[in-house]
Amino acid sequence: MRKMILAAALASLAFAATAQHSATSPVGKWKTLDDKTGKVMTISEIYEAKNGTLAAKIVEAVGVPATCTTCSGQHQNKPMVGIVTLWNLKANKDGTWGGGNGYKPSEDRSFTAKSVKLVDGGKKLEVKGCVAFICRTATWERVD
């Protein structure tokens, strides 16, 4: 009986730590939304890269073609799944990430990833990207 109670207590602590981590870290899976329609375009996964920065890649094509026909260069006519869309994101002292780069396959556009910030208790992510001095913010929703 003691072992069962101890196991249950440890399991609840592990669950609490995981839940807290998800509210403070963007690591995990996210729905990317179309700027105009609000419909889900892809499921992207944010992960820690080997160099200690954060990166994101498409893991599921939902509302986009399976092949990137709008892409040029290295992504032209390649599968959407696997395309890296954010990289070299560094942690800032204010709890955001930035100073990295990004690529939006649907527009075949590279951008500077100025800011990545968790909002709504970690349920949403605001990704601010800039091309020259023109910036836009996209909202991603966490996948449960």
Image (cartoon, rainbow, N blue to C red):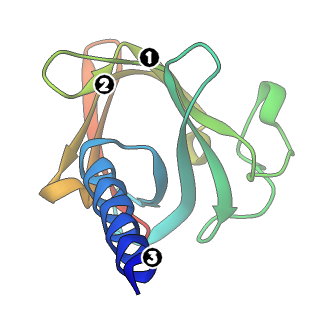
**Which quarter of the figure has residue 73?**
top right
Instruction: Nearest to the eye among marks 1 and 2: give it.
Output: 2
Numbered disc 2: secondary structure: strand
Q: How far apart in space, not on screen, are marks 3 and 2 (Cα)?
A: 42 Å
User: Where residue 67 sits: x, y (%)?
Assistant: 81, 56
**Which quarter of the figure has residue 47?**
top right
CB contact under 8 Å: marks 1 and 2: yes
Q: How far apart in space, not on screen, are marks 1 and 3 (Cα)?
A: 47 Å
User: Where residue 87 sits: x, y (%)?
Assistant: 54, 24
Residue highlighted by disc 3: 3
Q: Residues within 10 Å of mark 1 (few under 14, many from 20)?
A: many
User: Where residue 3 sits: x, y (%)?
Assistant: 45, 76
Looking at the image, tell me whether mark 1 or mark 3 is earlier in sequence order: 3
Residue highlighted by disc 2: 97
Vertically, is 142 above or below 116? below
The residue located at (43%, 82%) in the rendering is 4
Vertically, is 4 above or below 51? below
Quarter of the picture containing the C terminus is bottom left
Residue highlighted by disc 1: 100
